[in-house]
Every structure is written in C-alpha cells, then in structure tokens.
Image (cartoon, rainbow, N blue to C red):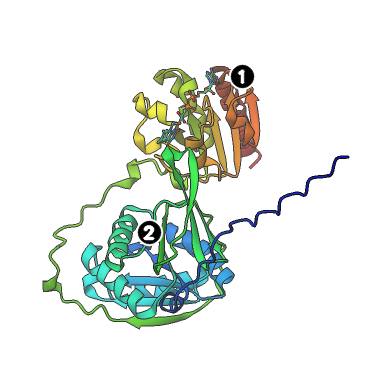
Amino acid sequence: MTQAATPPPAKKPAGRKKFELDERLLAYKGVWVFIEAERGVVHPVSWELLGEGRKLADKLGVELAGVVMTAPGEQAKQYCAEAFQYGADLCYLIEDPILNNYRNEPFTKGLTDLVNTFQPEILLLGATTLGRDLAGSVATTLQTGLTADCTELNIDMENRSLAATRPTFGGSLLCTIVTLNYRPQMATVRPRVMQLPARDAQRTGRIVPHALGMIETSIITKVLEYIPDNLTDKPQLPFADIIVAGGRGMKRKENFDLIWDLAKVLGAEVGASRPVVQAGWLDLERQVGQSGKTVRPKLYIAAGISGAIQHRVGMEASDVIIAINEDPNAPIFDFATYGIVGNAMQILPALTEVFRQQIATAKLAG
Ligand SMILES: Cc1cc2nc3c(=O)[nH]c(=O)nc-3n(C[C@H](O)[C@H](O)[C@H](O)COP(=O)(O)OP(=O)(O)OC[C@H]3O[C@@H](n4cnc5c(N)ncnc54)[C@H](O)[C@@H]3O)c2cc1C
C-alpha cells in the first residue's frame, strides 16, 4: 500500500522588507516645480511639469508649488499668476537684481536655501540646458538623488517616494528609480515628454517671498553681453504641430526632397531617424528619439523608419502617427495609428499631390 507523501510545508516568501521613512525625512512635504524663465518668457516645460506635479501632489495629498527666481519687476507676479493657472497652489518667489541673467551660483544658492527652509519632498526641473545645469548643482549641494531625463513620474505609495522612470542600457530598457534615504527627490524631464495641462484662467494662489541674501561682488561669474542664439533659423521640432520624418529606408539624401515637398505642402517640420543624421543627410537638430528631440505633434508621418525603441520614445506621444514602410512586419506598425505598406518613393509624392489638391480646394471654398 502506498501512502501519499506529506507535502513539505510551504516556504514563506522572503518578501521585501518594508522601508520606513525616518522622522527627519517625514518633515519634507510638498511637490515643487522650478519655473524656468529667461528674458520675460517662461519655458513651456515648466507648465508641462506643473501638470505632472499636480498629479503627484494630489496622490500624496500635499500642495504643489512653483519656484520663481527673477530680477524684480512686473514679470515676477506674472510668472506666479501663470503658474497658478497651470495648477500651482503657491509660489516661492525670490526677486533680486542678481537674478537678471541665469548664473549657476546665485540660482543654486537661492534654490538650495528655499529647499532647506521649506523642505519639499519632490523637486522637478526641465531637462533644458539651464535646468540640467541647475539640477546637477542643487542635487550635489543638497547631497540628494537626482534622476535625469525621466519619461514617467509616479508615486510609490508603499514607501511614499517618487518613482522616476527613465531609459537605461542605451535605451533598450526602462528603469524606475526611487530615492529612499534622501530628500528632496529630484528629477528632470525633457520638454514635450509630458503633456501641457489645461490652463484655468480663474485659478489663483499665494506667493511666499524669500530673500536671496547675496551680493554681486561675491559672485565670480559676470555676464558681459547677451548674444541671442538666433533660434528662428533652427528647426523647432519639439513644438511643431506636424512632422514629416524620414529614415534609412529613404535610401539616399536626394530622396529627402520627397519628404521636404510633403512637409512644405502641410506646413510641417522635417524630422529624421538617427542613421539619417549619421549619414549627414540632415542636421542633428532634426533627429527624433532618445538621443535627439522628443516631439508631440498632432500628426507624425514616418517614411522608411522601422520604429526602433530609441526612435519610438521620442515620437510615440504624437496624436496621430502615419507610418509608410515596405515591410508589413516593421515594428512601427505596432504603434502607428495608420499604416501604409509600400514604397515611400511612390507613396510620398502621391500624398503630396492629394494634400496639395485638398488644400487648394479648401482655400477656394473659403
Ligand atoms: C544609445 C542609442 C541611442 C539612439 N538614439 C536614437 C535616436 O535618438 N533616434 C533614432 O531614430 N534612433 C536612435 N538610435 C538608433 C536606433 O536603434 C535605430 O537604429 C534607428 O532608429 C533605425 O533608424 P531607421 O528606422 O531609419 O533605420 P532602419 O532600422 O534601418 O529601418 C529602415 C526601414 O525602412 C524600411 N524601408 C526600406 N526601404 C523602404 C522603402 N523604399 N519604402 C518604405 N520603407 C522602406 C525598412 O523596411 C525598414 O523598416 C539609437 C541607438 C542607440 C544604441
């Protein structure tokens, strides 16, 4: 007679040890967004971050604050008013003539002073040239964690910590980073990665003024002259409504005339995948993707682009994606809104002609 073997007692799963924030870190409360402004204009990434910050603050049940640092003047109140309309509950405001032009030293001092005084748990900045410079020095001064170029921000409620997701291993993987033992938790996000929130003209908030406490003679860097980088000639891909992009499937530089023709008819910008830029067919300014620009147009037409993850991360937030590819199994068809299987050299001129006629008819109809 055989007897059923008694099953061994089930092993208890090892489980993750629950992390507990110590008292010192629990004192940090609130989500902050640095409002980046230069020469009277706020960089739109600040408003995009307020949209994300609002969601994080609501999950945590805390306030969302903007940080405005500027020379004294009308613009200071205007930046704060706009920040309220984009979702901030309050703004910390440092007004000082020293802050007229961006310099790392006074901005780092001002922002670290604010953090040490008011203790936010999360601090977000745009991954712009200015934002990257400032975020790095503020994080180093405060000796806290900074996750750069995030593509997603969330809250790990179990640990009450920011879960900041970014590409890693050359963009082939996404990793989520938490900063458990330090506050504030800092992150930067590139322009156009997050959606611009709706603006509510009725929203207001309160302003908390703060002094910079620096004198000009203590700052080593001096701004002698301002030479504008003439952006008007440069492509403005991140803010384009329509982009026609070409990839290696366009075969040679001359074939890009077909891309330019369609872009002209649609009033679009021209974009490219990395091999196109590496081949010297188009400038680096036009590269879309992980190591290029992040775009969010209403319409993205991709011709001869396979849809590799490094390209996808830069354009998948487009409202409508039309992919033209002769390979029906190209990965881009997995996430395109509409797919056209065929030779781009034939399809592009056909599209250009149809759009030309449609636009002409629409103009005639008034
Ligand atoms: C660290 C790192 C960062 C990177 N950053 C970026 C980045 O920012 N942006 C980026 O784009 N890439 C980036 N890459 C490169 C990326 O991995 C891909 O190699 C690249 O996106 C492929 O470009 P492609 O689609 O133009 O070329 P391919 O992958 O070669 O695809 C060409 C496509 O064209 C199609 N095709 C061929 N002939 C025709 C035709 N006549 N008509 C229609 N379709 C045709 C083919 O079927 C194919 O799908 C990066 C890679 C690394 C490792």
| Residue under the image location 35 percent in, 82 percent down | 209
In the visual, does 59 lie left or right of 226?
A: right
Residue 325 visible in the snapshot:
yes
Indicate the position of residue 284 as horizontal and vertical percent values: 35, 35
Residue 119 position in % (x across, y down) = 39, 76
Task: Name the foreground residue: 23 vs 326.
Answer: 23
Residue at the farthest front position: 1
Q: CA distance from mark 2 to mark 1?
A: 45 Å
Residue that carries the numbered disc 2 in the rendered image: 146
Residue 46, image quadrant: bottom left
**Along the viewing direction, whichever of 15 and 50 lies nearer the viewer:** 15
- Dividing the picture into quarters, in which one does residue 170 lie? top left
For the point 37% across and 61% down, which residue is it? 145
- Crowd rating for badge 1 (residues with CA inside 10 Å; few <14, some 14–19, many 20+): some
Q: Looking at the rendering, which quadrant does residue 65 occupy?
A: bottom left
- In the rendered image, residue 159, in percent from the top left (x then y), is placed at 53, 66
- Ligand 1 has an atom within 8 Å of the beta carbon of the residue at disc 1: yes
Query: Which residue is painted at 36% across and 53% down in the image?
Result: 128
Q: Mark 2: which secondary structure?
A: strand
Q: Amino acid at mark 1?
A: Gly
Query: What's the amino acid at mark 2?
Result: Leu
Q: Quick one: label 2 or label 1, which is nearer the N terminus?
A: 2
User: Where is mark 1, residue-wise?
Assistant: 342
Ligand 1 within 8 Å of the CB at mark 2: no
